Amino acid sequence: MTPLLEVEDLVVEMRRHRVAFRAVDGVSFALERGGALAIVGESGCGKSLTLRAVMGLLPSGGRLSSGRVVVDGVALPVEARGRGRGHRQHRRMSIVFQDALSALSPVATVGNQIAEAPRHVLGLGRAESRERAIELLRLVGIPDPERRYHAYPHELSGGTRQRVMIAIALSSEPAILLCDEPTTALDVTIQTQILALLAELRRERGLSLVFVTHDLGVVSQVAENVAVMYTGRFVETGPTAEVLAAPRHPYTSGLLAAAPDVDRPEHEPVAIPGSLPDPLALPAGCRFHPRCRFATAECLTTDVRLQPVGPGRQSACLHSDVLAAAQAAVGHD
Amino acid sequence: MSTTTADTLGLDEPEREVAQRPSVGSRALHSPTFMAGATLTATIVALVLLAPVIGRYSPVSQDLLHTLAGPSGAHWLGTDELGRDIWSRLLYAGRTDLQVGVLAVLFPFSFGVFIGTVCGYFGGAIDTVVMRVVDIVLAFPFYVLIIALVFVVGVGTHGIYIAFALTDWVIYARTTRSATMVARSLDWVAAAEGGGLSRTRVLWRHILPNTITQAIVYAMSDIVLVILAVVTLGYLGLGIQPPAPDWGSMISDGQNFIQTNQWLAAVPGMAVVLTGIGLSLLGDGLADILRPE
Amino acid sequence: MSSRAELGDMVPTTTGHEGDMVPTTGRAAPFIRRLLTSPGLRYLVRRLLLSIPVLFGVIVVTFLLLRLVPGDPARTLLGLHAPAAAVAALRHQLGLDEPIWRQFWRYLYGLAHGNLGTSIEYQGPVASLIPPCLEVTASLVLVATLFAVVITVPLAALAAMRQDRAPDHAVRLFSLMGLGMPSFWFGIILIVLLSVDVHVFPVGGYGTSFWTHLHSLILPGLCAAIGIVPVLIRSLRVGMLEVLSADYVATARAKGLRPSRVTFVHVARNALIPTVTLLGINIAYLIGGTVVIERVFALNGLGNLMLNAIDFRDFPVVQGVTLIYALGVIIVILLTDLVTARLDPRIRLK
C-alpha cells in the first residue's frame, strides 16, 4: 500500500537579520493510512515550519527551497513561497494550530467558521452546512452545540476553543490531520481530554495524524511512531515504544533524562549541557557534538545523516551502537 | 557552561546562543533610510545655516527696478514682487522656520515625557486628571486650537511657542505613559524595585531609557508637523511676521502672482516638502535602529 | 456553490452573550427587552457618559481662552493703543466686569439655550452665523473623509499584500512625500493646474446647487484628505500586515477556500477594524486642516468665519466657532467608537 503522505527532503529557508538559514534541513517521512507520527523537539527546531510547509502555509519570510510532498501517490506542486493551496489533494490535509485564539477569526461566530468549509469548499447548502457544523461541535465534545454555534471565539474557554479548531479541521473532511502543538497551551486535564478526542477520531474515522510537540510525556499517548528533531533535522526515528525505551541518539536520551518521570519519582531530571546553537552559526560536523558526552574527533568533522540502526529505526549518530551498549550495561529501562 | 533547564513534562524555551546584535552606530550606517534622511536633513540644515554666506543678498533688501525677474546669474531663483532675491529669502526663511520648529517642540517633548512617565508610573489621581486634560486638548482640532491661541496670545514667534507649549505635549504624554506602564510591568523592573533601588533611580536609570526612544522617534515626525503648522500660520498671516521671511508667507505672497509667475509660490512649498521628507526619513531610520529586537 | 464572497455569512450578530440564541420570531416585546439589556446599548450609554467630562472640559477651555493672557482681556482684544473708553465699553459688552464665576455661569446658561454670544463685528448672535458655515464645513469634511478612505485603503492593502516588493516601496515613497506637504500649497498647485488654465474645477466658492456644491468640494476635499493620507497609509499598512500574517488567515486558507474569499471575507473584514479606528484618531486633524483649505478655496465655512473674525478681533465668534469644532470632534469620535464596537465583537463585552 502506498503511504498516504510522503514527505521527501523538505528544505525550508527563513530570513533573519537579512540572512537566510535553513530552518528545516532535509526532512523526510511517510505516513501510512490510519497511522500516526509524532515529531518531538525543543522550541525552534523547525517542527512547526515542517507542518506549515507540508500544508503550503509558510509565513512570510519563509521559502520552500526544495522537497516533495506526495499525497496518496500524487505529488503536490511546489510553490516557492510555500503558500500554494490550490491542488485538490491539498484538501485531504487539515491543520490544528496551537493558539486557537489567534487561529480563529475574532469577528465571526465559531459556528459560521466551522460551517464555512462545508458551505464554500464542499458545496453544501446553508442549512446543511449549519447542521454539519452543529454535528461537528457535538462530535468534538462541546455541550449544547446549537447555542455554542453563535458564540464568538473570545467568549469560549481555551479547551473549548481548541475543540472548535479541531472541528474546523474536520469540516473539510480530511484524511490527514496535522497538529501543531494543539495541547501545549492547555491544562493537563484538558490536554488529556483533547488527546483522547484525537485518539477517538482516529479510531472512528480512520484519520491519519502528524502530531508536533515539545512534550515527551504526550508522545506515547498519541502516536505509534516518533521522530526526534534537532536544528531542522530528524536525528532519530522509529516506533515510539522502542525509541522511548531504548533511544539510539544521545539527544533523545538527553531529552528523556531531562524530563521528570511521574512513575519514578526517584529519577532526578538531568539537563542537557550547553544550549541550542544559533541557526546562523551551526557547529561543524554533527550539530549535537558540543553537547554530547559520546562525541569523538570523528563527530566534529562528519555531517551525520539518518542511518538505519534496527528494524524500522533510524538514528543520525555515529555511535548509536555505543549508546545502545551503554544502556544495556546500565540496565536502562 | 550554561545548562538547559527543563520544565515539568517537556522542554520549553531553552536558552540559545544568539548572534550578537550589531552596535547602534553600525546599524545606523547600514540603514538606508537613516542615512538618506540624515544626509538630506544635514544638507538642508547646512544650507540654511550658511544663509549669510551662500545667500548673496539680505532677505529684506528690495530692488524695485528688478521685480519678478526670472532665474539669472545675479539671482539664482529670480526675484519676487518687491525685487527681493528669492534664493536668499528661501534660505533665511528656512533658518527661521526650522529654528522655530525645533524650539517649539522642546517644551512639549520635555514636559510631555515627564508628565507621561509620572502618570504611567504612579497612576492614581494625577493619572486620571492628566489623562482627562489630554482628552480635552485632543477634542479640539489641532489647527483650530493653535489659531485660537495665537489670536489670543498674539501672533509671531512668541505666540507660536506658547500655542505649541500648551497643546503639543499631549501625544508625548500619552505614548510615554503607555510605554512606562508596559515597562513597569516587566519582571526585571519589579526586581530592581524589590532590590531596594529608590523609585527615582528606577525611573531614571531603567524605565526612562526604554520609553524615551519612542518619544524621540515621535519627536521627529512632530517637528515636521510643527514646521507645517508654522508655515501654515505664516500663510494665514498669523505666524512669523514680515519683514522676517517665512516659507508660508512667501507662498501666500506668491499666490497673488500665480497666473504669471508660478515659481514664487511653488519654490517655498517644495522647500517645505523636501524638509519634510528629510526629517521623516530620519525619523523612520531612527525607529528602525532603535527598535528592540 | 456560490461564486461571490458572501459577507452576509460572516457578519457578526448583535448578541454578545454566550448562550443567547438569535430569535427566529419577530415579536416586538422580546426584541425590546433584548435591546434594553443588550451590551451594545450599555456600551453606548457608557461612552456617552464618558464624553460628558470631556465636553465640560472643552466648555471650560473655550471660556478661559480669552483669559489666558495676563491682564485685561478687553485690552488684549483691542490692543495697547486703544482708548480707555473703548476698552471699558468692550469690557461691559463682553460682560468682563463681573466676577469670574458669574461670567462662567452666564456662559453655561447661554450655551444651554443655544446662545453663543454676540458678534462684535456683526452685532448679532454668533449662533445665527454658524449654520450656513457649518453646512459648508461639514460637507467638506465628509468629502475629504471619503477621499481619504478611497485613496488610503487600496494603497495600504496593496503595500501590505506585496510587502517589501515594488508596489510596497512605491506606496511608501508616495506617502513619504506627502508627510511634509502643506495641504494649502498642494491646493494652490491644483488650482493652477486644474482651474486657472484648464477649467475643470472652479477656482473657489461653494456653488449654488447640490451638484455644484459637490463639484466645488472635490479639489478642497482632496487637499484636506492629503493632510492625513500619508499618516493613514503608514498606519493602515502596518495594521493590514498584522491581519495578513494572522493565524486565522492561515486557518482560512487551510480550509481550502478560494483566495478571493479569504481576502474579502476574512482579511478585509478584520482589517476594517483598524481602518475605522485609525480614521477616528486622525479625523480631528483632518477637521483642523479644513480651516486653511477654506481660505485657499474661498469657501464660506467655519474656518473662514473664524479667520475673518480674527482679522476683526471678534472674540465671541472665535470662541463660538472653536466650541462648535470641538463638539464636532467629540461627536465624530463617539460615532467611530460605536462603529468599531459594532465591527469588533471583542469590544462590546468589556
Image (tube, coloured by chain):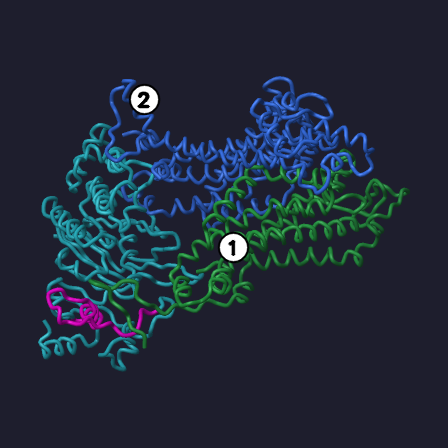
Chain colours: A cyan, B green, C blue
**In-front residue for pair A192/C33:** C33
- Whole-percent x and y of residue B4? 28, 70
Residue B2 on the magenta span:
no
Q: Please give the name of the residue rendered at 59% of the width and 49% of the height, measured from the top-left corner.
A: B222
Query: Callout 2, which amino acid?
Result: Ile
Vertical relation: C65 (above or below) B13: above
Between B223 and A7, the one lying in front of the other is B223
Q: Position of residue B85 (x, y in %)?
A: 82, 48
Looking at this rendering, what residue extends furthest in the right direction?
B65
Q: Is residue C314 left or right of residue C276?
A: right
Instruction: Please determine whether, in this image, residue A284 is positioned above or below residue A165.
Output: below
Q: Is residue A293 above or below residue A143?
A: below
Dot 1: chain letter? B
Q: Which residue is mark 2?
A: C32
Q: Position of residue B285 (x, y in %)?
A: 55, 57
Q: Secondary structure at mark 1?
A: helix
Q: Is residue A250 magenta?
A: yes
* Badge number at residue C197: none
Q: Nearer the viewer, mark 2 or mark 1?
A: 2
Q: Quadrant of residue A22?
A: bottom left
Q: In which quarter of the view is residue B194 placed? A: bottom left
Q: Is residue B177 visible?
A: yes
Task: Give the residue type that dot 1 points to.
Answer: Gln
Instruction: Determine which quarter of the picture holds residue A181.
Output: bottom left
| Chain letter for the residue marked with disc 2 in the picture | C
Q: Is residue A115 left or right of residue B196?
A: left
Q: Residue at x 70, y 44 (%)?
A: B159
Q: Which residues are magenta?
A: A248-277
User: Mark 1 sits on what residue?
Assistant: B214
| The N terminus of chain C - image quarter | top left
Q: Is residue B182 left or right of residue A291?
A: right
